[in-house]
Amino acid sequence: MRYMATYDMMETMRNANQWLGATALSFASYPIFSMTPNPAFQWMAAWGEVTERTFYRMVAKPDWGIRTFTCEDGKDHLVSIDIVVEKPFGNLIHFAVPGRKPVKRKILLVAPMSGHYATLLRSTVKSLLVDCDVYVTDWHNARDIPVSAGKFDVEDYTLYLAEFMREMGPDTHVIAICQPVPLALAATAYLAEEDPDAQPRSLTLIGGPVDPDATPTEVTDFGRRVTMGQLEQTMVQRVGFKYPGVGRMVYPGLLQLASFISMNSEKHAKAFSDQIGHVARGEDGDHDHHNRFYDEYLAVMDMPAEFYLSTVQRVFKEREIARNSFTIKGRAVDIGKITSVAVKTVEGGKDDISAPGQCIAALDLCTGLPDSKKASHVEPNAGHYGIFAGSSWRNNIRPLVMNFIDRNSEAPKPAAKPSAKSAAA
């Protein structure tokens, strides 16, 4: 029962606030009150509507919302989301567009497992669907995974990525965003030794902490200051009886959300107070800026405790990827073994989570890769979110990434066999 009471208490508080919002909205919306109009009832209903929506979104997995796509033939084609590989902690999904002409670029988009669902990359997927065949890693909420499924740490995550790359084949181009960047690099190095023919054509790393100490941020400083014992005592809880993963140790999504909001509490408080005013005046909508942003931002998922703790310990504190000392089941993974996969890094000049310098460190680790296979880009005015979504991604970064993919789409030439003369010598 250790840590279970606190998990249930957090869920109870969330549930109670959702109920209060629904109650206020229902009460203030009674038709009888229309006989004597009073602004107080309008504000109460607006507060209730915003509150109910806010606390409901915290436990609702967002929908991808990508149902049709207009192709070059001018027709709208349905988009089906198919499961290619199904595993306990995450699936490989494919955004199939039946009836569309085959496209050359096959993309594996590696979504982060850092509190939000893969749907956070919705706009990125939409932009790639234009001329790419898109696959995405869709990670599951840990509270819905039974304890019988076992553990899931950074080594398991890396092996999942390697399996997904094998499934998709060597003509794949991998784009990893944020948290999975160092592990996508490790998975590629793992395949370079274990199954060279399954390696992807290219690897694009966007805003990830390959070397957290290259340019320290508040995130990396936190990882340095806090001990592993403190993290386990304050951040880890056990899933309650309401969910299939009862008893599993997790880093709860609600606790993560509290940390996210505390970093910019005044900004978020103003956004919600302004939204209540918009609702009261009838100026809101399901797809207004506030709801579009917060419907995704508030939707959080629990992370397996062993994944969270091993990420902090091995990626941030011990810097195993940065020191090229990462191991899987006791076997060393040498990033220098990557010799044929083109690697590109993308960083944002105003990224305060994974600052410039942390991601480009990957290129120095690829000692076996020729300079012609390496590339990097820093987007001067982009923050962390802007380097994979928004105008910076659409206008500047995406065209560079597509050009990089096209330049490295050909299969690597096999090494030349020594001639009989040189062999005799």
Image (cartoon, rainbow, N blue to C red):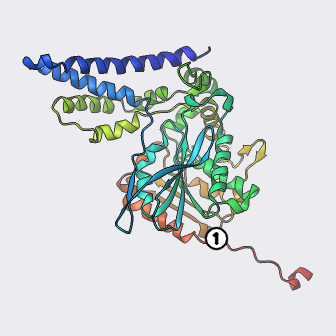
Q: Residue furthest right?
A: 424
Query: Is the C terminus in the top left, top right, bottom left or bottom right quadrant?
Result: bottom right
Secondary-structure class at tag 1: loop
Q: What residue is at 20 percent from the left and 18 percent from the top? A: 28
> From what the image shows, is residue 10 above or below residue 165?
above
Q: Is residue 173 visible from the viewing direction of this image?
A: yes
Q: Where does residue 263 sit, x and y in percent of width and height?
A: 41, 32
Total marks in image: 1
Q: Position of residue 131 (x, y in %)?
A: 45, 64
Q: Nearer the viewer, residue 153 or 311?
A: 153
Front residue of 200 and 41 = 41
Which residue ends up furthest to the left in the rendered image?
36
Q: Residue at x 65, y 68 (%)?
A: 370
Does any portion of residue 425 appear in the rendered image? no
| Quadrant in the rendering for residue 202 | bottom right
In the rendered view, would you say 356 is above or below 248?
Answer: below
Residue 350's spot in the image, x, y percent? 41, 48
Residue sitting at x 65%, y 46%: 160
Where residue 200 appears, as percent x and y from the top left, is 63, 61
235 horizontally vs 329: left or right: left
| Residue picked out by circle 1 | 411
Q: Quadrant of residue 75?
A: bottom left
Amino acid under disc 1 = Ala
- Is 264 on the left or on the right of 61, as rendered? left
Locate the N terminus by quadrant.
Answer: top right
| Most distant residue in the bottom direction | 421
Q: Residues within 10 Å of mark 1 (few under 14, many from 20)?
A: few
- Viewed as shown, does residue 145 lie left or right of 13? right
